[in-house]
Amino acid sequence: MMARKYRLGVTRKAANVVVKALLERGIPVNGNTGFLLTTRGRKSGADRTTPVNVIEVDGERWLVSPYGRVGWVHNLRADATARLWRGRRRETWEVEEADAATAGRVLRAYVRKIPVTAPFFDAKLTGPAEAFAAEADRHPVFRLARSRV
């Protein structure tokens, strides 16, 4: 069976509106991993905000795109500054995109932590990191590298 393709349909848009409203008010979503990510639009220069999950693996924090090369991925590739926030908590980070081997172990940890994303991967939930590394080009991973004040 092949991985599902991500489509931003009516249901997902509605869920994003609810999650975004909760995060804006500082209410944690999906454990404590939910944040709002604001990036600068690569073409428009306007701020773009979307809900994301930040996970910790081996003492480092990671942004994962379980749904592929979505808008915020393109924006981070053009300007490697991620502004993460939830309620009054605000953080600005420089990000670095991970290589496939590193992404593999992060992707595996991500899918295990947030199993609702598993259908978007060919690798199985219990599969090895190498199986996830093979998908790294379809699921970009960014390390939160340096905090910026």
Image: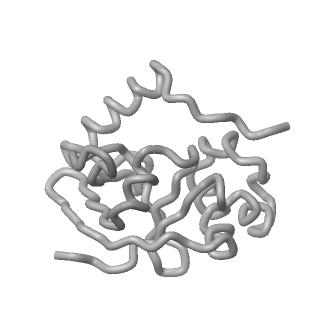
Q: Nearer the viewer, residue 64 or 45?
A: 45
- Give the x, y percent position of residue 88: 14, 56
Say which quarter of the image contains residue 32: bottom left
Closer-to-camera residue (8/31): 8
Relative placement, left or right, of 90 versus 124 is left
Tag count in the figure? 0
Location of residue 136 with respect to 1 vertically, above or below: below
Residue that appears at 38% across and 60% down: 78
Task: Give left or right: position of 34 versus 118.
Answer: left
**Residue at (33, 63) in percent of width and height:** 79
Quarter of the figure with the C terminus: bottom left
Horizontal placement of 111 versus 2: left or right? left
Along the line of sight, the residue nearer the viewer: 79 or 60: 79
| Furthest residue toward right | 1
Q: Residue at x 23, y 66 (%)?
A: 91
Q: Quadrant of residue 90?
A: bottom left
Q: Position of residue 144 (x, y in %)?
A: 40, 72
40 lies above or below 81: above
Q: How is the image coloured?
A: one colour
| Name of the residue lying farthest toward the top | 10
What x and y, as percent, mark residue 12? 46, 27
Q: Residue at x 67, y 70 (%)?
A: 100
Q: Residue 1 placed where, x, y %?
A: 85, 37
Residue 30 drawn above or below residue 95: above
